[in-house]
Amino acid sequence: MSKLPPKGPKKQKVLGLDLGRKRIGIAITNEEQTVVFPRETFSYKNFAEVILHVKNICDTEHVGLLIIGLPLDEEDRKRSITYFVEGKGELLREKVGLPIAYVDEAFSSQEADEKLR
């Protein structure tokens, strides 16, 4: 799993993606990467639609990095959806032309709920 690259001197927005087989969740940071804004849930039938949509957002918002949630099980093992996400992530890297980093998304919803309490 790719670790997040260190922040460089250049400010850049980061686009976060939660890839599913029928829809994706999209969020974007500010340039300082201190705030994350939920953007949308995008439903699709063909992954080419996702590529075009993500590329458009990246071009419009001047995104410099894609972060993709990697679904692992409780013991950090890959599942069938993990291989799907990795394959689509590599396709996005190739077609959108931006670096990507994978972040383990296990328990992220549970952790967010706990922080809100």
Image: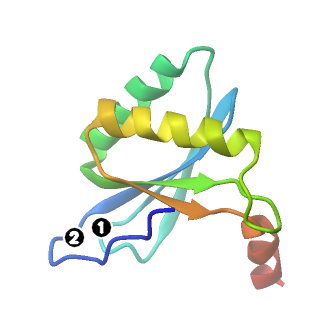
- Residue at the left extreme of this rendering: 9
The foreground one among 69 and 115 is: 69
Residue 28 relative to residue 99: left or right = right
Location of mark 1 (residue): 31
**Which residue corresponds to the image point at 20% horizontal and 76% vertical from the top-left?**
8
**Which residue corresponds to the image point at 46% horizontal and 72% vertical from the top-left?**
35
Q: In which quarter of the image is the C terminus?
A: bottom right
List x then y, in percent, for residue 2: 45, 63
Q: How many marks?
A: 2
> Would you place residue 79 above or below residue 53 in this image?
below
Label at residue 11: 2
**Which residue corresponds to the image point at 51% horizontal and 34% vertical from the top-left?**
88
The quadrant where residue 86 appears: top right
For badge 1, the amino acid type reads Glu
Label at residue 115: none
Residue 109 relative to residue 70: left or right = right
> Would you place residue 96 above or below residue 25 in this image?
above
Residue 2 relative to residue 78: left or right = left
- Residue at the top extreme of this rendering: 45
The foreground one among 107 and 14 is: 107
The foreground one among 41 and 106 is: 106
List x then y, in percent, for residue 46: 56, 15
**Which residue corresponds to the image point at 70% horizontal and 53% vertical from the top-left?**
71
Dots 1 and 2: beta carbons under 8 Å?
yes
For badge 2, the amino acid type reads Lys
Other-residue count near label 2 (Cα within 10 Å), few / some / many at <14 / 14–19 / ≥20:
few
Secondary-structure class at tag 2: loop
